[in-house]
Amino acid sequence: MFGKKAEAIMIVLLIIGGIIGLLFLINHIVFFANNFVRDCSENLECTENQYCGSDFKCHEIPIRQQTIVEQYYSYNLIGPALILGIALVGSAFILKKRKNRKEEKVQALPNHEQMQKDWQRYYTSQGKQEDHLSERHH
């Protein structure tokens, strides 16, 4: 009814489908067979002192002899405390010295009234000299 080409195509498709189905079945059979051969697939399936290895078999957990050593750490902070104390005392002396120097400088300056009198004397004497000089040139 369809022709020879159509029948050939149908036969080829059936063969390909059969091969794919057969490969699918073989794959599932192998997968399930591997699952049945396994000793375990997770650690819960093994006993308390065993673990499930990458080969899906239960293996004994290796027990290591551990010695627990308690170490007592004493933090000796005397050295750092001394360093900080010396630094604080030294900085206090430096600051006090600077303050004393500033006070000495302020005391060393003449007082304001005395400076004004000195300026007035200086400028008046300069002015008189200039007047004498200007009179000579005329």
Image (cartoon, rainbow, N blue to C red):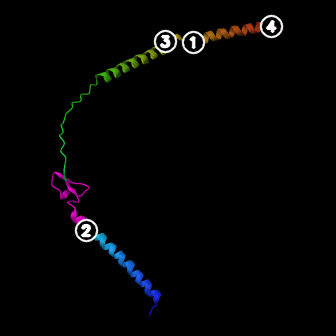
Tell me the kind of residue under disc 2.
Phe
**Residue indicated by mark 3:** 104
Along the polypeptide, which appears first: circle 2 or circle 1? Answer: 2
Tell me the kind of residue under disc 1.
Glu
Please report contact status of discs 3 and 1: CB closer than 8 Å, yes or no: no
Q: Is 62 covered by the magenta stretch?
A: no
Q: Which residues are magenta?
A: 30-58
**Residue indicated by mark 4:** 135
Tell me the kind of residue under disc 3.
Glu
**Can you tell which of label 4 and label 2 is closer to the viewer?**
2
Q: Residue pushed farthest right?
A: 138
Name the one closer to the observer, 101 or 81.
Answer: 81
Along the polypeptide, which appears first: circle 3 or circle 1? Answer: 3
Q: Is residue 130 left or right of residue 1?
A: right
Q: Secondary structure at mark 4?
A: helix
**Can you tell which of label 3 and label 2 is closer to the viewer?**
2
Q: Secondary structure at mark 2?
A: helix
**Can you tell which of label 2 and label 1 is closer to the viewer?**
2
Q: Is 33 covered by the magenta stretch?
A: yes
